[in-house]
Image (cartoon, rainbow, N blue to C red):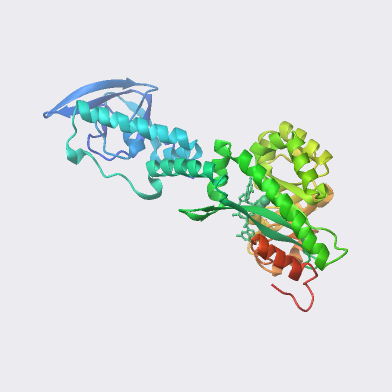
Amino acid sequence: MINHWVRQNFAAGDIVFKEGDMGHDAYLIERGCINITINRDGEERVVASLREGEMFGEIALIDQMTRTASAIAIEATTLIPITRDLMVSKLKQSDSLLSHMLEVVVDRYRDAMDNHAPRAPELTGPRETGMHNLRDYAVNQLKMAQSLSDALERDEFLLYYQPVVYLQDGRLAGFEALIRWNQPDMGFVSPLGFIGIAEDTGLIVPIGRWVLATAITALGQFQKTMDAQHPGNAGLFMSINVSARQLQELGEVSEIAALIRDSGVDPRRIKLEITESALIDNPEMAALSLHKLKELGLLLAIDDFGTGYSSLSYLGQFPLDTLKIDQSFVATMREKNASLRITRAIAGMALDLEMNCIAEGIEHASDIEALLTMGCEFGQGYHFSKPLSEAQAQEFIKRRAVPVSGANPSG
Ligand code: C2E
Ligand code: CA
Ligand code: CA
């Protein structure tokens, strides 16, 4: 990782940057003094004298245009540069509305400067394009949030269902419901591209409600097909992803209890998947919600296990049924010994804690044997099936609900 905090030392008279240079860094003065000067009619005029703790160069850093002034050390000075990469990564982690506001403020500042002291055109550098263009990024995020808020009403979401199988014989055990957004201009948008925005804006709450209702209804339909095709089957489960923001609300249980009652589906067939990081963000609240949901009879799974740096002592506080081993370990198990060992350790821990275990991201048949030896009961991944539309899932139930590990594997 780049160290963004490498100090730079300047002697009296050293130029930090000149008017017209491209702005890549802002600077924090740790020690010393900096004069900010502008050149008017061939004469350098000091417009500010800055000392310890003050910052300069931030405007050009943000909008990636040329410097509108020069900075000169007037005594021995130490600066902490704040790089553009750091700024970009901070902005991307921040709220899209806030980063857009920042862009607008910078624009207004530039306009005000232009009105008061018109800049020569050659001082105006080209704007950056592509991924690093913060303005495009912020506007894009805002547009996305806007169209996301209409998407529910416009019926643009749908669920896909990825089969989860018994590793022992490939029999279908259940599905994981995965949301898709069919956006009229952009086409299918991956949940990785919008779940974060939905969480930031709070839209995840109504979207999550829709996911729950839709997935529970689908489970009822899938179980009907299962019963018709394979009488006496063990029953399918439906895994539903729940984000941190939804957990508290779900803990109030009346809504989900009503959903389950109305659907007639057995609550012991509905599995809520909560990521490890959602649990450790607020463990007390999470434990409270999970215990209430457990009382309703629901199954609970911890998702992406191994990626959230949780303290293992938390695990015992949560009434969990299933541990999902993150696909980053499973996918690299064959070539990386460390992944293999981590997968084995996680599977062993699940057994010790009397949970069952689902390995995610299985893409190769050769992984199945290893996972079975580790005591992992369930698997999910492209090797068995990609996520399927509701109609395709119905077909899958008809074809694959019986053991497939024998002489005639299909699909
Ligand atoms: P996740 O819960 O870990 O879901 C598994 C993701 O891995 C899915 O991506 C799935 O399509 C993908 N996957 C499954 N098998 C394989 C494989 O063998 N190889 C590879 N490379 N990938 C595989 P997807 O559908 O894009 O979902 C991404 C994430 O979005 C999910 O990760 C979940 O965190 C979130 N998400 C999806 N649907 C919902 C939802 O309804 N609500 C919430 N809150 N989050 C959701
Ligand atoms: Ca999941
Ligand atoms: Ca996962």
How many marks on residues? 0
Residue 41 sits above or below residue 92 on the image: above
Q: Where is residue 186 in the image (x, y as percent from the top left)?
A: 47, 54
Q: Position of residue 144 (x, y in %)?
A: 48, 44
- Residue drawn at x 75%, y 40% is 256
Q: Quadrant of residue 253?
A: top right
- Residue drawn at x 23%, y 22% is 47
Q: Between residue 296 and residue 320, name the one nearer to us.
A: 296
Extreme-bottom residue of the structure: 407
Q: Between residue 197 and residue 17, name the one nearer to us.
A: 197
Q: Position of residue 232 (x, y in %)?
A: 88, 63
Q: Relative to 252, is 245 on the left or the right?
A: left
Q: Relative to 352, is 107 on the left or the right?
A: left
Q: Between residue 339 and residue 401, name the one nearer to us.
A: 401
Extreme-right residue of the structure: 232
- Residue drawn at x 55%, y 53% is 190
Residue 167 sits above or below residue 82 on the image: below
Q: Can residue 93 be seen in this view?
A: yes
Residue 292 sits above or below residue 217 on the image: above
Quadrant where the image shows the C terminus: bottom right
Q: Quadrant of residue 64?
A: top left
Q: Where is residue 182 in the image (x, y as percent from the top left)?
A: 54, 54
Q: Can residue 317 be seen in this view?
A: no
Extreme-left residue of the structure: 41
Q: Quadrant of residue 293?
A: top right
Residue 365 sits above or below residue 145 on the image: below
